[in-house]
Amino acid sequence: MNTDLRLSLQDITREFPGVKALDAVSLDLYRGEVLALCGENGAGKSTLMNVLSGNLQPDKGHILLNGRQINITHPQQAFEHGIAIVYQHLSLIESLSIAENIYANQQPCNKAGFIDFKKLISNTAGLLKRLRIDLDPKVPVGRLSAAQKQMVEIAKALVKEPQIMILDEPTASLTERETAILFDIIAGLKAKGVSVIYISHRLDEIFSIADRVAVLKDGKMQGAFTRSELSRNQLIKLMVGREIRQIERQSFISKDVLLETVHLTGKGFTDIGFKLHGGEILGFAGLAGAGRTELARAIFGADEKKGVVRLKGTEVNISHPLGAIKHGIAYVPEDRKQLGLFLDMSVTDNIGCLLSCANNAWTFNRDEATKTAKKFIEKLHIVPANEKRKVLNLSGGNQQKVVLSKWLNTNPEIFIVDEPTHGIDVGAKFEIYSILASLAQEGKGVMIISSDIPELLGVCDRIIVLREGVIAGELLAGDASEEKILALAT
């Protein structure tokens, strides 16, 4: 790591109505270093990065770049100063191609001033090849998986050749292989003197890749430390202000089969057969494109399928999510912002929106929904404890708790959750794991789809591994390991 100071944030303060999101935050970033920025959801990380990227302006404080004070009043200025950001929630236009997204606002043009599409495709193909991203530049982004979209977002930032690269939860949707590729990319950036701010809740990644670790809590900087100065437990305590006890996994599996699939086939998967028992937490592992999400959506009735689905031994035909809800199946999607929430609506509206479906009612009972929202706010520790607050204004972890509350409110027998802790801090992760464990203890069946193998190993009774749309194998909790799962997945 070079000791040349590249960026200095000095006493950055930003307030919103009733909330001081950043309280005199100061932070230095050096040339060629990877600085991990840690903190719970709501600690101020995203606000600080939005200030640096020009989406927000500070109420007080200064930004120095290479020793010179700068003002960043909009994202284009950040780009001109060599600052690129890859957001946790993607900013791609799904109707446009990969090439058009990567080179947005900087397309190569011919002498007449029109976009040179041949050169655009060629340049994109070369960039994707260097990044080991095996995709056709002409494919619309809307056809890509979440992991593929994340890699395109990273390529879009890299084409700007930034001095400073900000990565916000970059591996939340990535497989082990793609994460390894990303880490190689970061190592290459470091070698070229590029500075990287790396935001992640995955502590193993932080201790693997960061040179220094800065910690935010409640909008205040707790300090910046070299990686060797911190243990995992010390970092957690700085982030959450308390010790986090590890989950003691217990098994509550019964003999009752809640869900069974036989020769289930659909887009992205073939001939899938498995059983989910009452009280079981069943994990689904696999690389991007293995068919895990597609399988879950088909069971939930969101996509077409062939084959047999049985609930408690009785064959059912679920062709629509409403039918799944009425059969006691809940599905928490991977992308909570796009598919799980009404962002401009209140916590009450989001938690209560499925109540009429579950109760076969035709009207929305506002009083009952408000009472229910307050119950889940208390039960799941949703912060701030305000049922009227728009979900848009909640942190990622609290948004996820709202999604979970919405589906828990339907009192499901089978709970399917895709990437349950995507972009969530360590404290909130423990709370969500506890919720899933309590469902199992109540005799419910829980299916977890996750790209986080340690997560699957920590909470699941059994893990099914998919590879290219078929079951490659399954492992009991006591026999499973990262090596065995990856061997089956690849």
Image: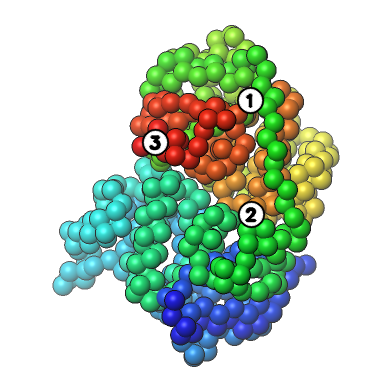
Q: Which quadrant holds residue 188?
A: bottom left
Q: Which residue is found at the position 78% from the left and 67% from the top? A: 18
Whether residue 137 is situated above or below residue 471 in the rendered picture = below
In terms of secondary structure, where does tag 2 sit?
Answer: loop
Which numbered disc, 2 or 1, marks the residue that appears first in the sequence? 1
How crowded pointer 1 is (Cα within 10 Å; few <14, some 14-19, many 20+) is rated as many
Quadrant of the image containing the C terminus: top left
Q: Position of residue 277 (x, y in %)?
A: 62, 19
- Say which element carries label 3: helix
Name the amino acid type tagged 1.
Answer: Glu
Can residue 40 be seen in this snapshot? Answer: no
Q: Nearer the viewer, mark 2 or mark 3?
A: 3
Query: What scheme was used to colour the molecule?
Result: rainbow
The residue identified by callout 3 is 487
Image location of residue 428, percent across then percent down: 68, 50
Along the line of sight, the residue nearer the viewer: 60 or 185: 185
Kindly identify which residue carries mark 2: 425
SS at mark 1 in the image: loop
Which amino acid type is marked by label 3? Ala
Q: How many marks?
A: 3
Where does label 1 land, which residue?
A: 280
Q: Amino acid at mark 2?
A: Asp
N-term-proximal mark, 2 vs 3: 2
Q: Along the line of sight, which residue is nearer the eye, 239 or 164?
A: 239
Q: Please report the residue visible at 63 percent of the width from the left and 62 percent of the height from the top.
A: 231
